[in-house]
Amino acid sequence: MASPSARGQRGTAALLLTPFLGLFAAVTLAPLFYAAWLSLFTTRTSGLGFGGTENVFTGLGNYARALSDGAFRDGFLVIAVYCAVYIPLMIGGALVLALLLDSGLAKARSFFQLALFLPHAVPGLIAALIWVYLYTPGLSPVIDLLASGGIDVNFLSVDNAVFSAANIAVWEWTGYNMVIFYAALQAVPRETLDAAKVDGAGAVRTALSIKVPMIRPAVALAVLFTVIGSIQLFTEPKVIYNASSAIGSSFTPNMYVQTAAFQNNDFGLAAAASLLIALFAAVLSFAVTRISRRGSKP
Amino acid sequence: MLRRTTAALAGSVTALALLATACGGGADQGASSTAAKKTGEVTFWSFVKGSDKVAEAFNRSHPDIEVTFETVPSGQEYYSKLTNAVKAGTAPDVAVVEFPHLPEFAAQGKVEDLTGLLGPVVRERFPDAARQLVDLGGRTWGVPRDAAPLMMMYRKDFFTRHKIDVPTTWDAYRNMTEQVKKADPAARGGVLYTDNPGLLSALSWQAGGRWFSTEKDSWKVTVDDGPSKKVAAYWGDLARKDLVRSLSQLDPFWTSVQKNRTVAYVCASWCAGAHQATVPDQKGKWAVAPVPTWDGKPASGMYGGSSFVIPKGSDNSGAAAEFIKWITTDPEGMKAWVSSGTSSMFPADPKLVPVTKAAFTTDYYGGQDIYTLMAQSYNAIRPGWTWGPVMGATNTAIVDQLPKVADGSVTLPGVLAIAEKATITQMEQRGLKVATP
Amino acid sequence: MTTSPTLHPAAPARETTPVTGAAPRPRRPRRAPEPPTALLSKAGVTALLGLATLYTLLPLTWLLLSSTKSREDLFGTNGFALGDETHLADNLGHLFEADGGVYARWLINTVLYAGVGALLAAVFSVAAGYAFDKLSFPGKERLFSLVLLGVMVPGTAMAIPLYLLAAEAGLVNTFWGVFIPGLVFPFGVYLARVFSASYVPDEVLEAARMDGAGEFRTFCRIAFPMVAPGFVTIFLFQFTQIWNSFFLPLVMLSDQDLYPVNLGLYVWYSSALTQGHPEDYLLAVVGSLVAVAPLIAVFLMLQRFWKSGMTAGAVK
């Protein structure tokens, strides 16, 4: 490539990247580094405590405290189970729905898109009200309905808590990812599909052997971000925290962070735990990326 | 357009990045309070209904001071917000803090010591029952607004129809819950909240328990002392036997009341107003009774109640103190609080009871004189109760376990032991001195 | 850590995309060419989608029905049944009168935070995503990984350091304290890179470069219109995210007049049942229903762009 062109690309890249990267540095990286700095300190007081507090440097003390806390470590096991349930269901569901919408066989496509996306638009507060209502024995019409069919379930029990949380997440996020996949399907060229038709490929085969491989990047991206999002799982279990005997204040690592930051004002610990979560996410997403790359090679 | 935005943004980015390095330590720094000038602007954070009216009324009668009221959410989020605001130096001049949270704020150095400014007022106007909650370590940290003495709410119509007596002792209360369940299998005579530890602590307090106390320069933590364990065993048993319902105190609880499934429950003075507002169509069916006791003699504790503080870093503490004094001890101030006529709050300053009593009509309760009942309960509050210095952690530890009580995976006295352990761990983490019992 | 997982879509997409001057693409056939199996018939597909829709919409009927109820009925009747009387009009009236009509103010604030914020965020994301996809510059992949790093730290916990920094900058309790953080949407950059790769064929850019068009001009005039469906998607996602953001406004704002809807509703809700003014609980429910309406409007508006995006590949 000619060098003026390369220089032009560099200059334009700088121009196009500056707004995002500048803001990103200010509102994401700066707080991140600040949090990393704060994670090296802890607040101490003495006696009855009424003499005030001071910030004490503890080095990696907060990290050691988080790692040696069984409550924090157990959260990662919860996440593992949660991911195993949630990711296949949600991504699979979103993909199927997007393919159905794109199949040319669906009526009222616009309506379905909206209806499937809508849960994502509902304020978290209301989602909480709705699902606590649906999960609470003695109130829930769903439980009554199942009971009349001879099925007794307690959505809030120890065995079911992860699934109940995953269900709320599936409800909220399937439509979101479906929108991504549907948008990606729009870019699949007409001619390729026509060629497949000429070859006598049916709708299912077209979907599986042409459309899915072509939107693979979008799917892999969705999986990657879903994994990262799952590691930060917070909202869904928090919704049923007060009602479920299975969910404590440090059920997931991110709930542990919230408790440290917002209940105990122990920001050093919260920051250290956040960065450990980030580290875990980094390692995992590296693995996910590797696997999806290897998978994409024939 | 894009270019100009870019330049502007780049500027602010650099500024922020510089700040990030400059403000590294993040130490708590609050400007020490200035002289007692009683003029100027005062910002005021509260989630208590009527706060806007109080600020307006104060501004009308105090032309030299301009109070700006800001609504904040209630609950743990609020306390976290206030703590961070003090840390960042953006805290208001006056803020509401519920009694259980006050020691934690004081022990983190987040509120001004009010001993000099308002100590005399607190000493003069408030009985021990309220004063013990704001005076800690020999200093005054807040001024009480409302007390919340325990009461019992019950469905008079249900009790009459099924010939159930109103219990005055906890033994009788247990019988009552059995009778209620027998009379209507869907109904219960009480609740064990799954998300609020406040009632459990209030009942421990009433039984003579003392979760926290101070001795010279150290805290004593006895969350599972004898009386508290007795209370926990009693309620845990009722919940296990399904004689009281294990429920969230929010919509599920009110749904159960509305659907005639909860026909009696223990609550506090403020509940009378909350109850009639939430379940208006059960007018005339409910009555208020004194809270049952263990030995039949009057005894009580507090479930709720709030105080006002000056957060650390306020630059107008003189005017702030004037405002606090007015809204907690002045009849006009009290009148403003209850001007909507829907609040049954019980003022911590006994002299102001006539004001609130006059504002709250008790038609809903068939004209019952509930303020006299409240006053009796207030006078019967046990002395010697202090809230703890890490109440957020204590409460979290309890709430984590509460939903497990009804299904038997943990006992309620066991919950107290867990909470005590979590509390001590957190206190030691912060460097507080914990006395060995 | 070099994570650029998915940036190169399958090759055929580029090779076969019509570049210039192609005839309008034929519409997809209305019927599958071979005899469809039961599930793949029109009715079957629609039935499957209908089933999924039931799952997403049924819980929401609670919100719709609750908004029409009186306070007594809200707690006294089945959440999925109508109340005894319809109070929707009353409830809406109360909603817009409460606290001196502050709800309308919250709505306007949120439209500014979310509407303008998401628009800028989407522009910045698409610009950055395009640069990452199509332009070559040193340190590209490392920079791209850095963006991912920012996403890996749990966001809610970052609200506190962000708040402390904003306090130093004097942005606490101002419009900017909530608005500026909304301009950054790292996931949008990732999406934009994928969309740029699949919607903008390299041949188009090469042709433009041959014609001597500047890189920036090429982006504005040629590439940007092509990624319109992606742009719309990113806008929608960030719009919803800002619309429903909670922790940041919570710590950042104390002036009620600056609140976004979501925080305002929380203020009503949080004290309604614990502080004994249940009328605010009903306001929070009705307010949530009304707050969903603008999101629906945005969604419907954006759907038109998606549709037009279907032919974007053929645009000259």
Image (cartoon, coloured by chain):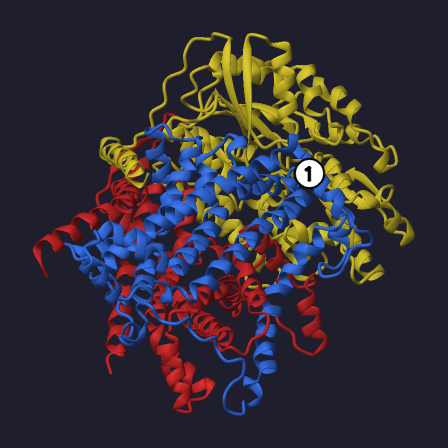
Instruction: Place residue C139 in its image quadrant.
Output: bottom left
Q: In this orientation, which residue lies closer to the viewer: A44 or C282?
A: C282
Q: Counting other residues with Cα less than 10 Å from the Cα at mark 1, is it few (<14), some (14-19), or many (20 or more)? A: many
Residue B347 located left or right of residue A168? right
From the rendered image, report the letter of the chain displayed in yellow.
B
Q: Which residue is mark 1?
A: C276
Please determine whether, in this image, residue B397 is positioned above or below residue C8: above
Residue C101 located left or right of residue B431? right
| Badge 1 element | loop
User: x, y percentage for residue A7?
Assistant: 12, 51
Indicate the chain on which mark 1 is placed.
C
Instruction: Place residue C117 in its image quadrant.
Output: top left
Residue A206, visible in the rendered structure: yes
User: x, y percentage for residue B85?
Assistant: 42, 31
The residue that appears at 29% across and 69% down in the rendered structure is: A288
From the rendered image, report the letter of the chain displayed in red.
A
Judged from this view, the residue extending furthest toward the left is A3
From the rendered image, report the letter of the chain displayed in blue.
C
The residue that appears at 77% across and 58% down in the rendered structure is: C82
Quadrant assignment for the N terminus of chain C: bottom left
Q: In this orientation, which residue lies closer to the viewer: B264 or C313?
A: C313
Residue A32 located left or right of residue C292? left
Please determine whether, in this image, residue A89 is positioned above or below residue B126: below
Quadrant assignment for the C terminus of chain C: bottom left
Residue A273, visible in the rendered structure: no
- The amino acid on which the numbered mark 1 sits, given as a three-letter code, is Gly
Please determine whether, in this image, residue C219 is positioned above or below residue B31: below
